[in-house]
Amino acid sequence: MPIRPVLWRDGRLDILDQRLLPLRERYLSCRTVDQVVRAIQTLAVRGAPLLGVTGAYALALEKKDPAAAARKLISSRPTAVNLRWAVERTLKSRDFLAEARRIHAEDASMCEAIARHGAPLLRGKRVMTICNTGALATGGIGTAFGILLRARAEVYALETRPLGQGARLTMWEAEKCGLRATLVADGACAAALREKKIQAAIAGADRIARNGDSANKIGTLSLAVNCRALGIPFYIAAPGSTIDLDARDGSAIPIEERDPAELSSRFPAWNPAFDVTPARYIAGIITERGILKPGDVKLGIS
Ligand code: MRU
């Protein structure tokens, strides 16, 4: 059975509640934009490309004030630029539902194209990844995960604290797809890269700036720095909708900070959801149009 993280059914948007995975597969039924916003903010639905798809469908639920609904959706998670991109595109269209379906289908094709370009780099290799970038994060097979899948790579998945998208979601998807995967604690990243003789690392992105700096789940910067120190190539995989040509470099990317209580209910905590990996650590950015050197991002891909 394919993983279907969002489903449009009888005028409502059903969202697979990712907070419950891998223990339970339960859908939230959303009939209003506010319900979708809540699902986005609480990470029931997540992953940059899927947030775009979800935002587009959410507009189709709004009957009164689509412009206000769009503002609410765009501000619900600030870092993933795909959400803004998809909501603004849908708002300009005549038929919101038809446009959302188009965005969903296009994202699925982009995932396949990304996998086609990236798989030859990672075929059969031992590859570390972070967060979840698969079907639970996109409209298709995933970005970085899609490449791992098509490459039949041996996956080492960082747990991705504090919310465990690697431990709960990537491991679950790998199991479902029959992909060999081993879970690694975030703190064991450098040791695993060295001891397990990891040959490459790959991550998704939530926003890529003009100069190739890439924001992704917190911990990605550590992974990239460790890879550089150990001479291992580090790749980013993302569709064109993740590139923000208005952001000159990583410093222009807003970084979402989440509730410190997600880390500790007792002690003061700092809980950024994302970090920015400077372009110089990235060996290549794998898009639906091919593999870009980070310095070529400014040329765009369309
Ligand atoms: O906070 P999340 O779970 O939405 O963060 C997701 C990530 O950082 C992913 O790696 C990124 O969105 C790319 S998903 C194809």
Image: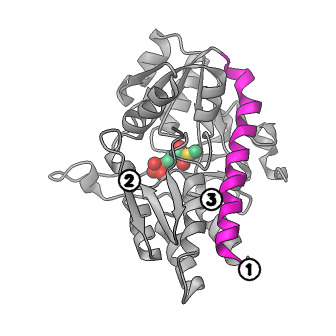
Q: In this figure, which residue is indicated by the disc labeled 2?
A: 17
Q: In this figure, which residue is indicated by the disc labeled 1?
A: 94
39 displayed left or right of 223: left
- Asked whether residue 115 is drawn in magenta, I would say yes
Camera-nearest residue between 78 and 238: 238
Question: Which amino acid type corresponds to the residue marked 2 in the rendered image?
Answer: Asp
Which residue is at a point 47% across and 11% down the rendered structure image? 196
State whether label 3 is within 8 Å of ligand 1: yes
156 displayed left or right of 20: right
- Asked whether residue 79 is drawn in magenta, I would say no
Label 2 or label 3, whichever comes before in sequence order: 2
Cα gap from disc 1 to disc 2, whole angstroms: 30 Å
Q: Is residue 274 visible?
A: no
Dominant SS type (magenta): helix
Question: Which amino acid type corresponds to the residue marked 3 in the rendered image?
Answer: Asn
Cα gap from disc 2 to disc 3, whole angstroms: 20 Å
The kind of secondary structure element at disc 1 is loop
Which residue is at a point 45% across and 76% down the rendered structure image? 32
The kind of secondary structure element at disc 3 is helix
How would you rate the neighbour count of disc 1 (Cα within 10 Å): few for under 14, some for 14-19, many for 20 or more?
few
Label 1 or label 2, whichever comes before in sequence order: 2
Residue 106 position, x and y percent, is 72, 53
Label 1 or label 3, whichever comes before in sequence order: 3
Camera-nearest residue between 271 and 27: 27
Residue 39 position, x and y percent, is 40, 63
How would you rate the neighbour count of disc 2 (Cα within 10 Å): few for under 14, some for 14-19, many for 20 or more?
many
The kind of secondary structure element at disc 2 is loop
**Span shown in magenta:** 94-123
218 displayed left or right of 123: left
